Amino acid sequence: MAAQPNTREDVEQLRLRFAEHRQTHAVRTRLPRELWAAAAKLARRDGITATARALAVDLSSMKRWTERLEPLDKSHKSRKLPAPPVFVELRAAETAAASCRVQVESPRGAKLRLELKTITAQQLVELLRAFAAS
């Protein structure tokens, strides 16, 4: 596997190329396609807004050039992203017992689904801790 170049170094090198072009050309001169192509690659990797800011270019221009030179494939746009993990705080009240449905996934990918008729919050916490430790 090839080593990935330092991302800050990539951005800094391209920023210097943009600055050099600006210093050696008239103010309203168009940036060369080669510079936009390199910027578009960075934008797909690091985000359009971050790249536009780092290179001091107009955000709408950065979007247009990125869409033109580094288009997203259709499968990437339509792919559904997994739901982010959710944190739920359980307050242990020994007196309250309730029925509940629990679905948990461990960091290693193990899944646990339970439907409990009566359980206290403290018992549920202990059960989930035991599951997470297994």
Image (spheres, grey):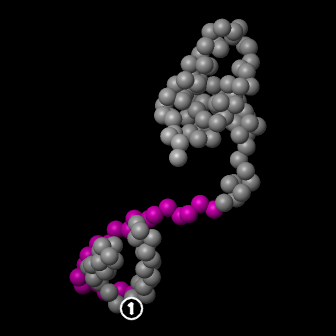
Check disc 1: other Cα within 10 Å, few if <14, some if 14-19, many if 20+.
Answer: few
Q: Position of residue 115 (x, y in %)?
A: 43, 87
Q: Is residue 98 magenta?
A: yes
Q: Position of residue 13 (x, y in %)?
A: 55, 23
- The answer to whether residue 81 is seen in the rendering is yes
The residue lying at 70 percent from left, 36 percent from top is: 66
Q: Secondary structure at mark 1?
A: strand
Q: Is residue 26 left or right of residue 108?
A: right
The residue lying at 74 percent from left, 18 percent from top is: 30
- The answer to whether residue 128 is seen in the rendering is no
Q: Is residue 123 magenta?
A: no
Q: Is residue 110 left or right of residue 25?
A: left
Q: Label 1 sits on what residue type?
A: Lys
Q: Which residues are magenta?
A: 80-99
Q: Please tell me which residue lies in front, 126 or 41.
A: 41
Q: Is residue 67 left or right of residue 81?
A: right
Q: Is residue 105 left or right of residue 75?
A: left
The residue lying at 41 percent from left, 68 percent from top is: 108
| In the image, farthest residue toward the front | 1
Q: Please tell me which residue lies in front, 72 or 53.
A: 72
**Image quadrant where residue 68 sits:** top right
Q: Which residue is mark 1?
A: 117
Q: Position of residue 86 (x, y in %)?
A: 44, 65
Which SS does the magenta portion mostly show?
A: loop
**Image quadrant where residue 40 sits:** top right
Q: Identify the image quadrant of the C terminus.
A: bottom left
The residue lying at 45 percent from left, 82 percent from top is: 113
| In the image, farthest residue toward the bottom | 117
**Height in image: 66 above or below 26?**
below
Q: Position of residue 121 (x, y in %)?
A: 30, 79
